Image (spheres, rainbow, N blue to C red):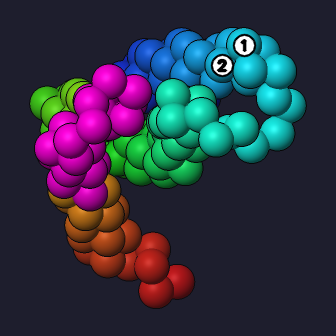
């Protein structure tokens, strides 16, 4: 079994962030006695979306990172992607939870999407150069 240490560390960071975001949502629901929806509460709505957005984007980030690392990309490349993914997820969550302006979220999503595209290009180059995409 090939070890993927950078992906493993990133997954651990993401697991902690997922629990933190989930806990904030659960605590907000408990405070409002709301088992479903946001009960019209702006703070709870933000918590739900911060948690949901993380759940939507983090899995693909980890899959891409693991594939890039597993295919033997340079350590600096893998580390750069991991930092970009962690930065994007942390800044986006902070923007959702603590700012009414879209600036932080926009920066985070730009970094996230740039890292997605970069990782995708690396994977496509690798697949096409080895012929595995055609076999």
Q: Which of 57 and 52 is in front in this view?
A: 52
Residue with the mark numbered 1: 31
Q: Residue placed at 81% from the left, 29% from the top?
A: 34
Q: What stretch is highlighted in magenta?
A: 89-113
Q: Residue placed at 38% from the left, 78% from the top?
A: 131
Q: Where is residue 109 in the image (x, y as percent from the top left)?
A: 26, 50
Residue with the mark numbered 2: 28
Is 83 inside the magenta-drawn segment?
A: no
- Callout 2: SS: helix
Kindly indicate the quadrant of the structure image that contains residue 22. Answer: top right
Q: Residue placed at 45% from the left, 74% from the top?
A: 132
Real-space Cα separation, disc 2 to disc 1, in angstroms = 5 Å
**On screen, 106 above or below 22?**
below
Residue 128 numbered tag: none
Residue 11: tell me if it is visible. Answer: no
Q: Do the residues labelled 2 and 1 touch (CB within 8 Å)?
A: yes
């Amino acid at each position: 079994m090939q070890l993927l240490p950078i992906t493993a560390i990133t997954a651990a960071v993401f697991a902690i962030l997922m629990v933190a975001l989930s806990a904030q949502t659960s605590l907000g629901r408990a405070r409002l006695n709301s088992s479903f929806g946001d009960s019209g509460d702006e703070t709870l709505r933000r918590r739900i979306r911060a948690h949901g957005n993380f759940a939507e984007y983090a899995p693909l980030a980890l899959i891409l990172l693991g594939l890039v690392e597993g295919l033997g990309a340079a350590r600096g490349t893998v580390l750069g992607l991991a930092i970009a993914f962690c930065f994007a997820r942390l800044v986006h969550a902070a923007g959702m939870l603590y700012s009414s302006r879209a600036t932080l979220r926009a920066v985070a999503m730009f970094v996230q999407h740039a890292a997605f595209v970069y990782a995708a290009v690396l994977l496509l180059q690798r697949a096409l150069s080895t012929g595995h995409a055609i076999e």
